């Protein structure tokens, strides 16, 4: 069973998020042999397709995790693909799930994911009308607003203009937009990764209600893993994440800025000098996300920060580093 709860920001307040990985067949681009270079999530999709009724029952089972507990709650549903892909979830299945959630008063936020090209006005509007009193977001994986980086470093298969179209459709249909950005795709230096994230935030901000900064980690069987094994790519420094998150919140204080540093402090995850303090920084990032309180990021000890600053200021590439 793949669902869990975590302290998180719920419609602008500190609360609890229930994360549910729905057992669908996963991303269609992965199935046709064109996956994003950093993503291995569809490999965890079921090898035998679940019935649509079984998926609805799975959601009911997952919701028991928050039954009888104090809210507010967010329910964030992932499919290792797109919630709006009719090949993964039929329209009647989506409606049924939202009807179940509409009856739960303590669930104040609902988030689904979709690739840009699968965002359709009628599909979003239908769901928004079922939960008119809830904070409903469609999360779109932009990753970067730079089309060249999206193509060469991610193999995203989308352009920024397609993201803009999807965001405008989402807003017109009555939902909000969460924008996923990837911090430090391959082939970028640490400095370039930071600058790309900041430039992408500025460019996407007019179309975005919530930013989620996804700090790259190394997933098995990906191109990112192959380059990492050859020491040609290093996951981002945690200080880079702190820099981007702090900058973004100060520049756009009315936007929600979220991040979940998966694998923080490990070689495969974002890390500084691989000391115990890395995990403290990871926890501080999560607390900032839940509260939007910058003090969690501004009061950190500067361990390894001078080494990080030297790398950034000199624009060093990963293969030029003696130690990681």
Image (cartoon, rainbow, N blue to C red):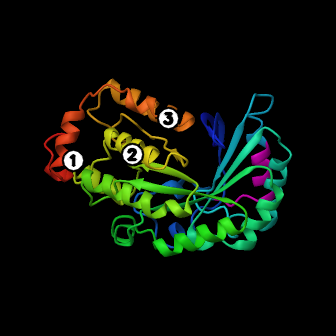
**Total numbered labels:** 3
Majority secondary structure of magenta residues:
helix
Residue 319 as seen in the image, left or right of residue 112? left
Region of the chain picked out in magenta, as a range: 48-60
Vertical relation: 128 (above or below) 111:
below
How far across and down, in percent of the image, does residue 231 sit? 22, 50
Image quarter where the C terminus lies is: top left
Q: Mark 1 touching mark 3, by CB under 8 A?
A: no
Tell me which label, 1 or 3, sits earlier in the chain.
3
Q: Secondary structure at mark 1?
A: helix
Q: CA distance from mark 2 to mark 1?
A: 16 Å
Marks 2, 1: nearer the viewer: 2
The residue that appears at 31% across and 56% down in the rendered structure is: 195
Residue to which mark 1 is pinned: 312
In the rendered structure, does residue 103 fall within the stretch colored magenta? no
Vertical relation: 296 (above or below) 176:
above
Question: In the depicted view, which residue is nearer to us: 180 or 81?
Answer: 180
Residue 47 as seen in the image, left or right of residue 94? left
The residue that appears at 41% across and 50% down in the rendered structure is: 219
Residue 168 seen in this snapshot? yes
Q: Secondary structure at mark 3?
A: helix
Q: Secondary structure at mark 2?
A: helix
Q: Quadrant of residue 37?
A: bottom left
How far across and down, in percent of the image, does residue 48 sit? 66, 59
Q: CA distance from mark 1 to mark 3?
A: 23 Å
Residue 209 as seen in the image, left or right of residue 250? right
């Amino acid at each position: 069973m793949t669902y869990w709860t975590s302290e998180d920001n719920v419609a602008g307040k500190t609360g609890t998020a229930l994360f549910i990985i729905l057992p669908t067949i996963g991303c269609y681009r992965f199935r046709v042999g064109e996956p994003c270079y950093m993503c291995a999530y569809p490999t965890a999709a079921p090898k035998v397709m679940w019935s649509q009724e079984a998926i609805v029952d799975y959601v009911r089972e997952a919701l028991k995790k928050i039954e009888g507990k104090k809210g507010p709650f967010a329910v964030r549903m992932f499919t290792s693909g797109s919630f709006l892909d009719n090949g993964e979830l039929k329209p009647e299945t989506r409606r049924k799930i939202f009807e179940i959630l509409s009856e739960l008063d303590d669930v104040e936020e609902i988030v689904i994911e979709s690739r840009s090209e699968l965002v359709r006005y009628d599909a979003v509007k239908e769901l928004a009308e079922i939960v008119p009193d809830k904070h409903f977001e469609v999360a779109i994986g932009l990753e970067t607003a730079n089309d060249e980086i999206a193509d060469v470093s991610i193999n995203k298969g989308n352009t920024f203009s397609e993201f803009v179209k999807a965001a405008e459709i989402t807003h017109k249909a009555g939902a909000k937009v969460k924008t996923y950005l990837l911090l430090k795709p391959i082939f970028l230096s640490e400095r370039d990764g930071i600058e790309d994230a900041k430039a992408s935030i500025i460019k996407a901000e007019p179309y975005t209600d919530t930013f989620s900064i996804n700090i790259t980690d190394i997933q098995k069987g990906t191109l990112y893993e192959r380059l990492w094994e050859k020491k040609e790519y290093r996951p981002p420094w945690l200080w880079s994440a702190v820099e981007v998150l702090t900058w973004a919140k100060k520049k756009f204080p009315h936007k929600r800025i979220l991040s979940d540093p998966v694998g923080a402090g490990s070689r495969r995850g974002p890390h500084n000098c691989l000391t115990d303090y890395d995990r403290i920084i990871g926890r501080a990032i999560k607390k900032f996300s839940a509260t939007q309180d910058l003090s969690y990021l501004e009061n950190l000890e500067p361990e390894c920060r001078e080494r990080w600053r030297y790398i950034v200021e000199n624009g060093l590439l990963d293969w030029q580093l003696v130690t990681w």
